[in-house]
Amino acid sequence: MHTVAVKVTVVQPLWSQVLEDLHRRLAEGEFSDRFPGDADLVAHYGVSRHTVREAVRRLQADGLLDRRRGQGSFLTHAPIEQPIGKPYSLYRSVDCAREGQESIVRVLEIRSDDLASVALGCPGEPLLYLERLRLADGLPLAIDRSWLPAVHAQQLKSVDFRRASLCDELARLCGVRLTSGWERIRPALPEPHERELLEVGARQPAFAIERLAYAGTAAMEWRQSLVRGDRFSFVARWSSEHFTSDFD
């Protein structure tokens, strides 16, 4: 009895072949300006729209592509890192990532807010309110809402916060330096109007960050931020002295 060797050829699915080639082209920097639409990819590869969409869906799942309804597809950036154990500073984090940053100032005014004034320990007093849409490389990254006692911060009304740091301007113009505080970070789903500002989907989570910062013993800033979870990450780093026998 003779044994006959049979060679089996495994054929890659078409979407897998397209995906493999897209990875190659991405690695070569081909799509630095614009990622092609489905119709362009169908014409380029000579495959069905279903095949193209599956390959593109895999790129999205890998976090390499961001598809926006009515706008097209865009390459994603590596998440901007915020060290754990330091006060949250979007300005510093974006600067360290060497990405261009700018803020769209949505509100800058003196107003009353019962909840914020109680949080700051000055119930009923007027507050300076600053609301900004923070951008990194021209793309929405976060919504920042800050309340400060107007008696200490009213000079900030004249500041152009499109590229300025709130903490730096508070020290420069008002002579107030933040010295301590606490932050609470939790996952959250943005509200519809926030999703529109951040350009995220209905099921895409974000980081909700609440901060109360002090100058000496006086509460000076209450901030609520909503940061895109796909563009921001918190990182803890430690050295040998942090390891103990009960480290798990």
Image (cartoon, rainbow, N blue to C red):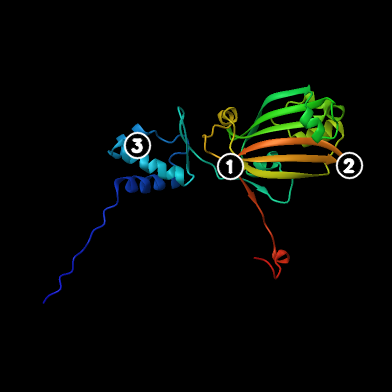
Nearer the N terminus, badge 1 or badge 2?
2
Q: Amino acid at mark 2?
A: Thr
Q: Amino acid at mark 1?
A: Gly
Relative image position of residue 152 (x, y in whole percent): 86, 30
Nearer the N terminus, badge 3 or badge 2?
3
As drawn, which residue projects farthest toward the left?
Answer: 1
Relative image position of residue 206 (x, y in whole percent): 60, 40
Q: CA distance from mark 1 to mark 2?
A: 33 Å
Question: Residue 142 appears in which quarter of the rendering?
Answer: top right
Q: Are marks 3 and 1 in contact (CB under 8 Å)?
A: no
Q: Amino acid at mark 3?
A: Leu
Judge the density around disc 2: few (<14), some (14-19), many (≥20) Cα neighbours within 10 Å.
Answer: few
Question: In this rendering, which labeled residue sits more in front, label 3 or label 2?
Answer: 2
Say which element carries label 3.
helix
Indicate which disc residue 208 carries. none
Relative image position of residue 109 (x, y in whole percent): 76, 22
Q: Are marks 3 and 2 in contact (CB under 8 Å)?
A: no
Say which element carries label 2.
loop
Question: Residue 8 appears in which quarter of the rendering?
Answer: bottom left
Residue 149 visible within the image: yes
Q: Residue at x 45, y 45 (%)?
A: 61
Q: Residue at x 68, y 33 (%)?
A: 144
